[in-house]
Amino acid sequence: MSGTVKICFIVNPVAGKRAARARCRERLAALTSRSGVVAEFRTTTGNLHARKLALSAIEEGFERVVSVGGDGTMNEVASALVNTGVPIGLVPLGSGNGLARNLGLPLDFDRAVEVALTGGVRTIDSGRVNGQAFFNVMGVGYDAELGRRFNDSKRRGFLTYLGLGVSVFCSYRMQRYEIGTEGNAPVVFDAFLLSVANSTQYGNGAHIAPGASLDDGRLDLVGITTSNPVCVPGLLTRLFSGKMDRSSHVVTISSGRFDILRQLPGPVHTDGEIHEMDTKLEVEVLPMSLKVVVPDGPQ
């Protein structure tokens, strides 16, 4: 890359481990100063601020915009860059980092910054549900309800999340879903969890849709059709071994569009971000709509 390239780093100041947060801007400045690029650093202050900063960066002529944070920050920045031709770089600091993992990006901070500065560009699909963009996975059911309750909780941390996970698992009831796809009769089934994936995994090696591809012009729907605790160990084993689609308790459908009708309105997550939506969900793929910076050179 030429030394005249302008790169905007959008930093979530509360992402990542506490010990590393104080040094994040300092490390970014040191790494970028050695690269010769023109870099600016902008810090988010709340919900949707990363998207606003990304839109401003486009207007100001930045040639790359780098998300420094978790999946929520990635989602906000990427949603501003769809169909603009401006690539997004990722310095993943979240707990899942599903898209970054699927792209083969390093999770080490310094190496991730190096890729964001010097990597090549790949074009991938994105998804949209009722107008809300997603790039990794969107979903309804158990995981969306858990996300809503965690967001509403005054306590944070893994133990809080784990405790809520058990509570929601014990209380959540499966819903009936009617799934319409392009030119096919609707499919109806009851599900505990329903995900539509652009990428293969939630993050941390949890491969909810092992057959998904980021650039095939399709999305992969995955429905878990049991809430029986006896089935949980087997499903978890398949989730982390990349064999989720081989379970008799899992429905998988691939399509460029899904019209989903559920029994009740409620939470929907897009890359982990929670939204309240009605019973009708219109999910569609936006083929080859986002440019991302990757370590392997142009794709």
Image: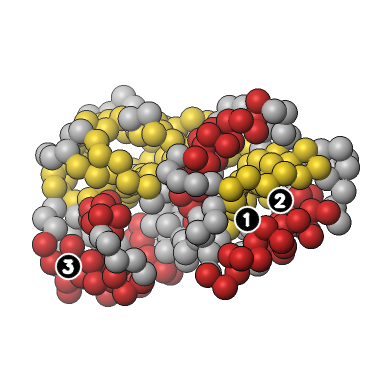
Q: Earlier in the sequence, mark 3 or mark 1?
A: 1
- Based on the displayed image, in which of its 4 quarters is residue 243 positioned? bottom left
Q: Looking at the rendered structure, which numbered label has been put on residue 91? A: 1
Q: Are marks 2 and 1 in contact (CB under 8 Å)?
A: yes
Q: Looking at the rendered structure, which numbered label has been put on residue 243? A: none
User: Element at badge 2?
Assistant: helix
Between 292 and 225, the one lying in front of the other is: 292
User: Element at badge 3?
Assistant: helix
- Residue visible at 53% across and 64% down? 16
| Amino acid type shown at disc 2 | Ala
- Based on the displayed image, in which of its 4 quarters is residue 160 positioned? bottom left
Image position, residue 295 (x, y; %): 72, 54
Residue at image mark 3: 167
Q: Earlier in the sequence, mark 2 or mark 3?
A: 2
Between 69 and 237, the one lying in front of the other is: 69
User: Element at badge 1?
Assistant: strand
Quote the CA–CA distance across marks 2 and 1.
Answer: 7 Å
Local crowd size for mark 3, using a 10 Å CA cut-off: few (<14), some (14–19), many (≥20): few
Quote the CA–CA distance across marks 3 and 1.
Answer: 33 Å
- Residue visible at 53% across and 34% down? 52
Residue at image mark 2: 116
Q: Is residue 257 left or right of residue 225?
A: right
| Amino acid type shown at disc 3 | Ser
- Based on the displayed image, in which of its 4 quarters is residue 48 positioned? top left
- Residue visible at 57% across and 73% down? 19
| Amino acid type shown at disc 1 | Val
Q: Earlier in the sequence, mark 2 or mark 1?
A: 1
Image position, residue 74 (x, y; %): 53, 47
